[in-house]
Amino acid sequence: MIPLIYGLAPIHLPSFFYLDLIVRGRVLPKGRYKGEPISIIIPCHNEETVIGNTLKALLKLRKRIKKLEVIVVDDGSTDHTFEVASSFKTKHKDLELKVLKKEDGGKGKSWAVNFGIENATYDIICVLDADSRPYLRSLEYLVPYLKAKRVAAACGIIKVRNKKVNWLTELVSFEYNIANYIQWKKSMIDSYIPWMPGTITLIKKQLAKFPPSLVEDAELSAKLIEEGYVIIVDKRAAASEVAPTTLKAYLRQRIRWSRGNWSLLKYYRNKKMLLNYLLTFFERIQPALTTISYILFGWGLYSRHYTIDFILTPLWCFSLIVTSLIYRQSIKEFKEKYSIKTYFIYFFISSFLYLLIWFRSLFPIKGWYKTKRVKDYY
Amino acid sequence: MEFNWWFYLLILNICLTIFSILANNRRYKYFRIAYSFYKKLKEENFLDYVLMKNTSLEKTTINDVEVYLIKKKEIFWSKASTISYGAVTIICAIIMISSFYGILTTPKLVQFLFLIILICSAYINYRSWRYFKFRRRI
């Protein structure tokens, strides 16, 4: 029974680096928000189901942030996104809202965001996804970091709004929780490169030039860090998002990210950041290692090698401990609760899903693979 | 009484762990001194000080010799604690993995002793930044 459990756990060589991520950190002073004006950019491509509610949520922020400009960029939508956002503008004239239409749109998020930034009035830019709703004080927590010279961007964490819809949304929420934890810790250690999450991201206007890429936020993060800037992740600042509710939508989204991540490898050749370089290398080859581990496990079962001294058992033991520790720490830090079922699904199924995504990402994808939103959640 | 090679390594690791505690204490002592210094003058620029690198030491925000010296000492102790923690981790990991695979012939207790030192060293480093409070007296 014991090798059966270990066998289903893939080899996690990155576990050594995750242990380092858990252990190290730094103390960051928290500043006070002094009424700095903010321009919020919301790129939209067929977002009629969510954009209205997002704008409603932003209205609440005005209680705390007096100078708030909201720019909705309609990036070649074929639905009623532009009309919904424009009607909101006529209803709420007191809100500083600009609704822009990009005629040659649909090329990707970076084009839309850069277009919005060009039209922004203020020096602090906040990039939000069309379905993202920041928590009331999130932007206040992030703005003070941008006063520091070396800080290029300050980001919050993402929570899943529709966590209770089905097993997949709970799984995505769990996955986000772990990713949030890893990014938060990476931002605390100089040897690693954290990624801006693409939403709830505050960035200095002069540095906000998103490159054309499938993962424009991660690519800009890597560029900025190469130039000597720092990206800070504050776990107090959060925004809620809608997770894909179907497996097909989930896979499409992950394939897009995974395909985009290949283009990031050029930024990891920086040997000064050796730990980040090695971690990325192991993360990239992890699916191949997983396949090898399954083959070895099958061989172990075939040769009736059931005992604890099975050749890879110590490594699996170690990876199991670190993986459990990272689950525990991420749940403790972000105060989320999950059913036991989710832990098991994540532990046993996610490696198969990642393997599938990884193989698919080796081949080019047609178009943008943008997630289609069918319904909004509260 | 006969001492084995692993015994000396064990002692070295314990010494490095104790050194790591001291280095962390010194590091955060200078951090607190810097905070009290900035609190009087420009508290909002303290983040600049925290993120300052070796290369940017010449251009301190307050541009004062005192800040420069405090930062230099803090960086020194920070590096000392990181190096001692790294050394403990590497030694423990090598001994544990080699013992698991039977490359080293050590008693089973030795692996556990090194594992305990690894856990202690990791926890000391985790605790130093996670439960830090500015309020404590310098």
Image (cartoon, rainbow, N blue to C red):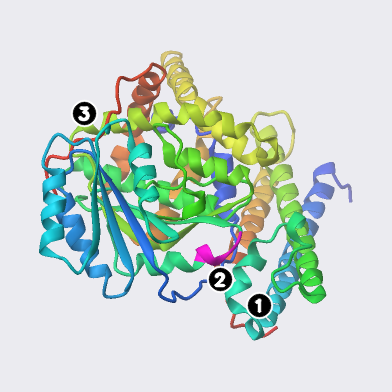
Type of amino acid under label 3? Lys
Q: Are marks 1 and 3 in contact (CB under 8 Å)?
A: no
Tell me where residue B68 appears, x and y as whole percent: 79, 69
Q: CA distance from mark 3 to mark 2?
A: 43 Å
Badge 2 marks a residue whose secondary structure is loop
Crowd rating for badge 3 (residues with CA inside 10 Å; few <14, some 14–19, many 20+): few
Residue that mark 2 sits on: A29
Q: Which residue is mark 3?
A: A248
Instruction: Mark 3 or mark 2: name the one nearer the start of the chain.
Output: 2
Quarter holding the C terminus of chain A is bottom left
Q: Is residue A212 magenta?
A: no
Q: Would you say residue B34 is visible in this rendering?
A: yes
Q: Is residue A147 magenta?
A: yes
User: What percent of the width, then of the height, locates residue A185?
Assistant: 52, 53
Q: Chain of mark 1?
A: B
Residue B20 sits in quarter: bottom right
Given residues B33 and A279, the one toward you in this image is: B33
What residue did someone put label 1 on? B35
Q: Is residue A65 above or below residue A369?
A: below
